[in-house]
Image: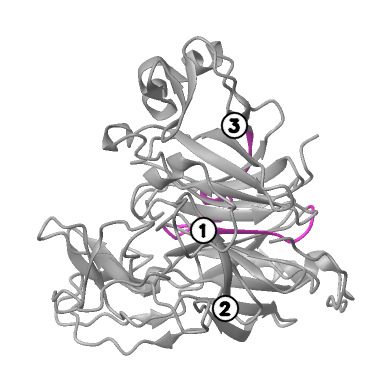
Amino acid sequence: MKTSTHELPDHSLDVEPVDHFYSKFAQGVPLAYEVMDIHHIEDAAKPGSFIEFRLGGFGSEISAHPFEKNKFYLLTDRGPNTTYDVNHDHGKIFLDPAYTPRIGLFELQEDGSIQKIKEILLKNPEGQLITGLPNRHFGATKEVAYDQYAKILQQGTDEFGLDSEGLVALKDGTFWVSDEYGPHLVHFDANGVEIDRINAYVHDSRRKSDYLLPAEYASRRPNRGMEGLTISPDQKKLIGIMQSAMSNPDASVNKSDLTRIVMIDLDTKAVSQYLYRQEGGADVHSNTAITALSATSFLVAERDDDFYKDNPQAFKRVYKISLKGATDLEQIQEIDMLRQHADMGVTVDGQSLEQYVLSAGWDGLAELGILPVTKTLVVDLVERLQYPHDKVEGLWIVDEQHLAVINDDDYAFTETEGMLTQKYLDRDQQVIDGNTLYIIDQLDLKPLP
């Protein structure tokens, strides 16, 4: 599981001043897409019209190319899907059940456009294409998969299926991907073939090595797993952030604003764990990306679900955080009320931290010496860009002043009150959402001391 850190030449574009080049992407540049072969689903927002499903979906995460300055990788999720809980079985309609999550390599062009260079489809250890269908056993979310006609899929699970959300491109040409099922952190080779994985399941035979997440990560909520993933600059530590509070020990804590960051040392297998306090509870906000500034300083994206057209005060912000001064939960010693529980992690008088913060607050945790990471605002995307999208899910540190962000367009459709509609960005329903890259300048992206 160790990674190589050999260096290759930098083939950066060097044709004009950096600020002028990146300013071409300041107002957002859309990615190209193809229309998917999914037909005859009416747009509930426009009776008589049908939804155009757009095959792009490269909005789950962004990762810098390790050597090519103006190239970057993007990740898709599990494919076009929507909630179908008519039978109270956590149902999901998969509009393209055979869809394979994938990584795309892209490049910024001198004319201000973005070119897709190639796609890497993700595969199981035998080299077979995976899907985005739920896992059967370890990491199963208990979601039932349906087709677009609301029929249960006969092959509705995939033991290697991923709901991919976090991406890291390494210097040795391999990739790490985190997901919302296990959550799993999966190591893929340069061709997208699975090498190994990390999760919280001791008896999972898909793991080839003995790296493990803390047991409490098995309590992640469906569709709110490990949303962001990054790696330290020395390529030795993987760092992941959970989207929302985990159901630790059960769903009664789901509205907590306590979320978790985990760090895995790829050399020693040591695990560290830290708390991140969201600005709103899990039903309001989501942590959607993390990227490293240094070994202890990171950027985190946090958002609500609102569109600017509906709420000009929508919440889409990027924070700079520091682990220094934060409590490593894995290092807490068992004294008095504090215990290290086999399934819930650190407990206080038998309560999980998610439970305890709801009853005693963050001040209560501080009195026990348990402190979250510190965070400061870097940029408010709504204030800066009048950011029109409901989601921001990828952060790319271009340099110490320029930050690229990417949205998830959900294949250009959404669900409103149980009905499917085209995903529009304007009240007149003329502008359809799409994956769009923005590069923001004049930011302080230096690591915190």
The residue depicted at 20 percent of the width and 79 percent of the height is: 154
- State how far apart marks 2 and 1 are (Cα): 24 Å
Q: Residue furthest left?
A: 87
Task: Give SS at disc 3.
Answer: helix
Tag 2 residue: 193
Q: Which residues are magenta?
A: 375-400
Tag 1 residue: 393
- State how far apart marks 2 and 3 are (Cα): 32 Å
Res. 443 mark? none
Q: Residues within 10 Å of mark 2 (few under 14, many from 20)?
A: many
Foreground: 217 or 296? 217
Asked if residue 432 shows in the view, the reply is: no
Mark 2 or mark 1: which comes first in sequence?
A: 2
Res. 330 mark? 3
* Cβ atoms at labels 1 and 3 below 8 Å apart: no
Amino acid carrying label 1: it is Glu
Task: Mark 2 vs mark 1: give the one in front.
Answer: 2
What percent of the width, then of the height, locates residue 369?
A: 59, 15
